[in-house]
Image: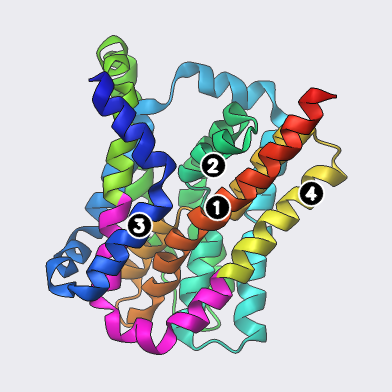
Amino acid sequence: MKKIGKVASLLTRYISIIILIFSALAFWKPEGFGWATNYTSVFLGVAMFGMGLTIRAEDFKIVFSRPKEILAGCVAQYTVMPLVAWLLSVLLGLEPDLAIGVILVGCCPGGTASNVITYIAGGDVALSVGMTIVSTLIAPIMTPLLVYGLGGAWVEVSFWAMVLSVVKVILIPVLIGLLLNKLFHHQIQKIRDVLPLISVVSIVMIISGIVAVNKEKLITSGVLVLGVVIIHNFLGMALGLLVARVLKIPYNKATAIAIEVGMQNSGLAVSLATANFAANPMATLPGAIFSVWHNIAGSIFAGIRRRGQEKIEKV
């Protein structure tokens, strides 16, 4: 089990490379991966279930012991990223399919990958976990509300259908994971190190499936979407860092907030696009490309921040 745990840790740390490899394979041989799009919600639900299994009672204590940082991170999460997504869609005159896809990414909660990237960066991992938990638990309200308000100018958005989608793929799996962790905590602790592998496999299959069925669209629109995603992600981390500095939050906590704001649960964006915007097939592209890019950018940002943290510790 320890060997599997080490493999899981290694795969989690290098998830961006793994996603790139499987995305390339899906682009080259789409017939081998296209089937995965039929199970996008299932894969995401499994990933969220795995997240729920890793949440401990101590994690909720963090939420209440650091209200300032948690609140700052979550408010920035649900203001900076949605507004930047909307602004980019307007300024660049994106067509409806791409606009709603970009806005979906911006309105999603923080992704679990942010916890791993925060760890690599030498940031406050406990704070990162706390922000991810809170933003995820309020996602059934915030995500549909923001998409309805910001995306309605491009396509028709069904608020309640989206609420139901988020509840099914996020809230219920996380709560079931939490319950099982509570009831069988000792047994689950034995396999705790293996659990990240569930999320890695699930996210890789989601992205591979989307790349496979959108091969032609990636050829025609991939560069544009990648450009939008890069700008969106960069501004998210930069503005998250700015918010933390304005509030005079310490370096390691500011690192966690910047990463949390900039790294979205793009798997949820893909799942919501698939379930709620079937008439807008390209709406899945921004989420798929964001899943690849934010891990690459996050790793680069983590290296920069870790060096800064090491300098502070030497002083």
- Residue type indicated by callout 2: Ile
Q: Please indicate, yes or no, whether residue 195 appears anywhere in the rendered image.
A: no
Q: Earlier in the sequence, mark 3 or mark 4?
A: 3
Q: Earlier in the sequence, mark 3 or mark 1?
A: 3
Q: Which residue is mark 3?
A: 19
- Residue type indicated by callout 3: Ile
As drawn, the label of residue 117 is 2
Distance Cα–Cα, label 3 vs label 4: 30 Å
Q: Secondary structure at mark 2?
A: helix
Comparing labels 3 and 4, the label whose residue is closer to the camera:
3
Q: Residue furthest top?
A: 186
Distance Cα–Cα, label 4 vs label 2: 19 Å
SS assignment for the magenta stretch, majority: helix
Tell me if residue 179 comes above or below residue 219 in the rendering. Answer: above
- Residue type indicated by callout 1: Met
Query: Can you say which quadrant of the picture contains the N terminus?
Result: top left
Q: Which residue is mark 1?
A: 263
Residue 130 percent location from the top left of the image: 57, 31
Q: Secondary structure at mark 4?
A: helix
Residue drawn at x 61%, y 54% as measured from the top left:
262
Q: Earlier in the sequence, mark 3 or mark 2?
A: 3
As drawn, the label of residue 164 is none
Query: Can you say which quadrant of the picture contains the C terminus?
Result: top right
Q: Please indicate, yes or no, whether residue 315 appears anywhere in the rendered image.
A: yes
Q: Which residue is mark 4?
A: 243
